[in-house]
Image (cartoon, helix red, strand yellow):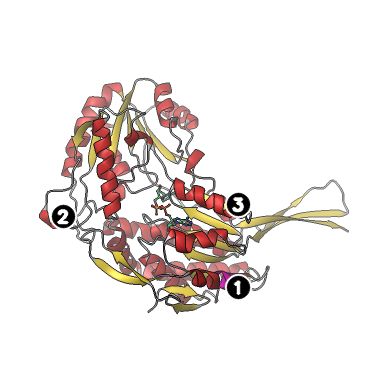
Amino acid sequence: MPDLYIDGSWTAGSEGVTAPVINPADGSVIQEVDQASRQDVERAVAAAKAAFSGGGWWPGTATGERAALLRRTADLLVRDKEDIARIETLDTGKTLVESRIDVDDVVAVFRYYADLADKDAGRIVDTGHQHVVSRVVYEPVGVCALITPWNYPLLQLSWKIAPALAAGDTAIIKPSEVTPLTTVKLVGLLEEAGIPRGVVNLVLGDGPTVGAPLTEHPDVEMVSFTGSVRTGQAIIRASAETVKKVAVELGGKNANIVFADTDFETVVDYALLAVFLHSGQVCSAGARLLVEDPLHDALVEELGRRAERIRLGNGLEPGSESGPLVSEQQLAKIEEFVASALEEGARLVAGGHRPDEPELRKGFFYRPTVLDDCRPDMRVVREETFGPILTVERFSTDDEAIALANGTEYGLAGAVWTKDIGRAHRVAGALRHGTIWINDFHPYVPGAEWGGFKRSGNGRELGPTGLAEYREAKHIWLNT
Ligand code: NAD
């Protein structure tokens, strides 16, 4: 079956181009996928525009019908969970356990927005005049381009497509060229759930050929993007000409602050999970460990010992605790980061090399790495590595910890570990990040907003704000 979905039909690219999708666990080609041309992008936008047709039939469907479609899609995701999780693992390299959690999360997101769709239609505003009724109503924005990254292809898409459909928008989806497979699968499930023709369109291909034309197109009203800061900046610039709504969710350099009074065993487990989940390819990865002086030596030693024991392997194999990096380029980037850190004076505590096992040599694996004696001016501390590298810095006061954690251009997430709940709240309040975990790392719920301060982004996904992003507020003044 062809891989592009335009105006309700599966189709190959108009220029007949395909591109290989690589399995990062062994470098093999999983399959060739069709690539969209500029002409295909034009057709997809035209289809989405026709389905929206100026407040017409898709936005005009009953909210309950749109919610029902989201619920049916969630049920189909449950039905196909194992198949989807397997494809996500093949494509991204993450372990099956991680992929299954992703599918569960996606189901929860679809159900959350199905429930929220009809809860808030607007409000009546007091005008001070009895003969005047002032109403604020929420309407869909229109045609939305949804552009997603390779690390959480299915999950990141759900955070966009579920609220967009709940709001009554129509969409063109553009997944990462590196990991497109579960997006194709999800669009197939939306079709099976009964999505009307043209409401959802799927174009595959790289950023310059397929992403950029969407961000410049006069008929695209909104771009919702998740990815790197550099691409986010390009998208904001490209969208400026046609004054689109732009919501960008970008990178992070997230501090995990550990005070000496915390529970040692728990913090070891969570510090490893924080940074090594999906081999560190997580926007909210706890890649910067800030440790209060008295705990520093013992914690670093134990983290190093435990990191050395993490079992790398093909994510499809049950014994694998951590998978490969997504690509050869990503692996090369990580090697460069570690080399630069060592040159700048970091001390290697664990990892720092590709694995020795011959069966892993064909894949893009890198040993979980712990670097001590790091400083905020080092490149490995300043930049998002997006790999299995934990840097450790030490501090001796609350203010010093806060200054270190905030001393970055990013502001996505962070965590505070302490038994002193007053201190935890004071520090959490002072951190300029969109999400703070206290005595935890990584959990989220669909009902709570997600997004970045500073260069980590300008939008919010999830929660009621995640729906509001896909709506326009209209004020209607009625003088009776
Ligand atoms: P990327 O910026 O390279 O690519 C993201 C998407 O943008 C891809 O689909 C790509 O094809 C497309 N693209 C590239 N150039 C484009 C252009 N000029 N116009 C339009 N589209 C274009 O990012 P990536 O490497 O796929 O993902 C990793 C990044 O994503 C990391 O920085 C990570 O922190 C970030 N991320 C952030 C969040 C969050 O919630 N804030 C979540 C996941 C990932």
x and y percent of residue 200 in the render? 52, 70
Whichever of labels 2 and 3 marks the residue nearer the N terminus, that label is: 3
x and y percent of residue 51 in the render? 60, 73
Label 1 is placed on what type of residue? Ala
Task: Provide the residue span drawn in magenta.
Answer: 45-51
Residue under label 1: 51
x and y percent of residue 344 in the render? 27, 29
Residue under label 3: 240
Q: Is residue 399 above or below residue 240?
A: above
Give the side of residue 105 with respect to residue 471, left or right.
left
What secondary structure is the magenta-colored segment mainly?
helix
Give the side of residue 391 with respect to residue 430, left or right.
left
Question: Mark 1 packing: few (<14 Cα in 10 Å), some, or many (20+)?
Answer: many
Residue under label 2: 361
Label 3 is placed on what type of residue? Ala
Question: Mark 3 packing: few (<14 Cα in 10 Å), some, or many (20+)?
Answer: few
